[in-house]
Amino acid sequence: MSAHGYRRYVALGDSQTEGVGDGDDRTGLRGWADRLAEHLDRTGPGLRYANLAVRGRLAAAVRAEQLPAALALRPDLATVVAGVNDLLRPGFDADGTAGHLEAVFEALTAQGARVVTLTFPDVGRITPLARPLAPRVHALNERIREAAGRHGVTVAETARPEVVTDPRMWSADRLHASPLGHARIAAAVAEVLALPGSDDSWTRPLPPLPLPSGVRAAAGELVWAGSFLGPWIGRRLRGRSSGDGRAAKRPDLLPVG
């Protein structure tokens, strides 16, 4: 028997859980869920792991497409992280988004799985142009906490530590975690699961960085808007998603190694 008791781990979600920002499509994506699976396997060899996440997916799609597959795999541990793609859409409905997530929580916990979810940092503290989204982030986080509480779901509060808005925690697009950010998310989930070797070190600040001048900061915002925000808006206007034509990278329960 493993030290933690988990033998079948299934991850559901969107690009963060798929691992975007930690590796690339040529060499392969790692991501926080892969890193968590590695931690689980180190402390309890024999773990089998599936990752059903697909970039661009809304909460409704996670419920419709990934939940049936997850239930068929009968996990004893599942992570469910989605909603950011929803809050970026013009017609964002916090209650509707959280309702889809709650349906996933309810179905997995009813089957006996331990379920973990996350809260999201204020993107306005990462990207000044995204400050108008702050009320949406807060609204979604509150509803996630409430839904989790109703179904015994564990919440890793990755929204709260100051370090989560350090630019080194984010990739160049400022929407996906960097390898360091993915490592910290994995450590946060490991801590709430009380896995052997876990602690709160993921919350600790990084060494200070010199502050950029006002000119450099403004130039950085313009480069980001042209390189990432513009193409994202273009996909929305065309009704396209970064996940179009993509399938889960790891649809079956397989040994971590």
Image (spheres, grey):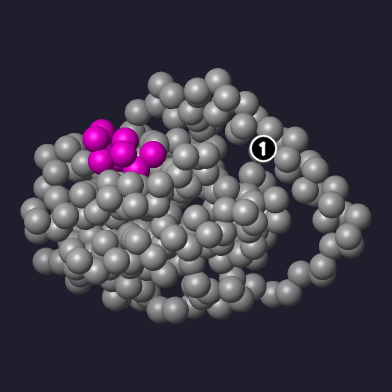
Residue 51 placement, left or right of 32 = left
Task: Return the residue nearer the eye: 192 or 236.
Answer: 236
Q: Which residue is mark 1?
A: 228
> Mark 1 belongs to which amino acid?
Phe
Say whether residue 62 is magenta: yes
Q: Residue at x 78, y 41 (%)?
A: 223
The local secondary structure at tag 1 comes to helix
| Residue at the image point whose x is 73% and y is 74% from the top | 208
- Could one spot residue 159 in this view of the protein? yes
Q: Which residues are magenta?
A: 58-66
The relative height of residue 139 versus residue 229 in the rendered view (above or below) is: below
Q: For the N terminus, which image quadrant? A: bottom left
Image: 126 above or below 202: above
Whether residue 189 is situated above or below residue 68 in the rendered picture: below
Q: Position of residue 50 (x, y in %)?
A: 26, 44
Does the magenta run of residues contain 108?
no
* Res 40 → quadrant: bottom left
* Residue displayed at 62% across by 54% down: 132
Task: Give the main secondary structure, helix, strand or loop, of the magenta stretch.
Answer: helix
Q: Quadrant of residue 236?
A: top right
